[in-house]
Image (cartoon, rainbow, N blue to C red):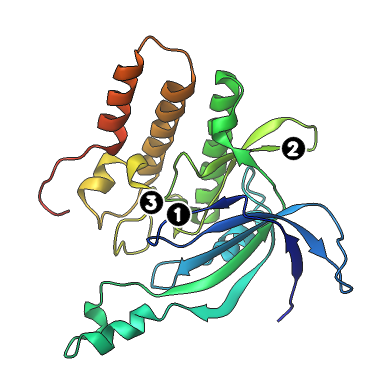
């Protein structure tokens, strides 16, 4: 095992609340063996990844995509598990005698870190409609070529498409966060792995995925998610003829509202 050291400041990004994977992102700088800064700024992601069947280490996915020269995805520098895992999954059995591990509603999580070369900014900082659509186009190209390389994203959302500058200083889209991706066979339009539960950001999931939680994710599902990202940012930031009150109602009804129905 090779250990790498990085200097970081306060989190550039972090999730709030107690539910989720506790993700934090840092702009970092590599340190040499003497503990001195060396090289360009990079981005370090610290998270608790799901440790269960059907999930893949994000770094392993990125390595495959980088080897296949898939454009508009992060460039892997290093990744690995830390010597920490959640205990609640095991402790649950102590408080529920007579139950089995298969009945536990909790998931095991493993502390994990990932470092990539690109330091990006949120898509919400786009300057005009062209830059928004171009970033989404870059994401679509990345998605198409990633599927050809064997992985489907499964979590296309407003927060997972970023902006970064290429070598010429032009702003490009980058399809980020591949931790929920699944394996897809070459030429297929459907994830080949068994879908044990819903994955993704529910405000941007396809209708079919929301209605059936065990539905295998398809390319068309992810393409539908790209469309929802376009609608979300276009209505939120670009000029239109809706009043503020109508816009607020639209966002609630389109992205956050729900109706109770049979369990999918």
- Give the Cα distance between marks 3 and 1: 17 Å
Which is more toward the observer, 107 or 11?
Answer: 11
**For mark 1, what is the residue?**
16
Residue 91, image x, y percentages: 33, 85
Residue 14, image x, y percentages: 53, 54
The mark that comes first in sequence, 1 or 2, is 1
The mark that comes first in sequence, 3 or 1, is 1
- 132 lies above or below 99: above
Residue 77, image x, y percentages: 71, 61
- 239 lies above or below 254: above
76 sits left or right of 198 in the view? right
In terms of secondary structure, where does tag 1 sit? loop
Residue shown at the point (44%, 24%) measured from the top left? 236
Residue 176, image x, y percentages: 56, 48
- Count every numbered label the image shows and give the total: 3
In terms of secondary structure, where does tag 3 sit? loop
Residue shown at the point (38%, 72%) measured from the top left? 53
- 47 lies above or below 225: below
Label drawn at residue 200: 3
**For mark 2, what is the residue?**
166
């Amino acid at each position: 095992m090779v250990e790498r050291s990085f200097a970081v400041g306060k989190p550039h990004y972090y999730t709030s609340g107690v539910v989720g994977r506790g993700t934090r992102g840092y702009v970092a700088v590599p340190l040499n063996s003497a503990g001195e800064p060396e090289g360009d700024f990079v981005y370090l992601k610290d998270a608790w990844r799901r440790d269960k069947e059907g999930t893949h280490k994000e770094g392993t996915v990125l390595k495959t995509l980088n080897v296949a020269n898939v454009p508009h995805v992060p460039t892997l520098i290093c990744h690995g598990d830390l010597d920490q895992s959640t205990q609640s999954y095991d402790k649950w059995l102590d408080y529920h005698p007579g139950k089995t591990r298969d009945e536990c509603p909790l998931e095991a999580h493993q502390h994990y870190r990932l470092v990539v070369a690109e330091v990006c900014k949120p898509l919400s900082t786009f300057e005009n409609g062209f830059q928004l659509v171009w970033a989404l186009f870059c994401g679509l190209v990345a998605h198409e070529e990633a599927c050809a390389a064997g992985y489907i994203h499964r979590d296309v959302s407003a927060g997972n498409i970023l902006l970064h500058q290429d070598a010429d200083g032009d702003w490009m889209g980058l399809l980020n966060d591949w931790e929920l991706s699944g394996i897809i066979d070459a030429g297929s339009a459907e994830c080949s792995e068994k879908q044990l539960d819903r994955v993704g950001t529910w405000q941007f999931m396809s209708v079919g995925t929301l209605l059936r939680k065990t539905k295998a994710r398809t390319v068309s599902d992810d393409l539908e998610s790209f469309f929802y990202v376009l609608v979300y940012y276009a209505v939120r930031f670009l000029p239109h003829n809706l009043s503020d009150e109508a816009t607020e109602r639209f966002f609630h009804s389109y992205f956050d509202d729900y109706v109770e129905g049979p369990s999918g």
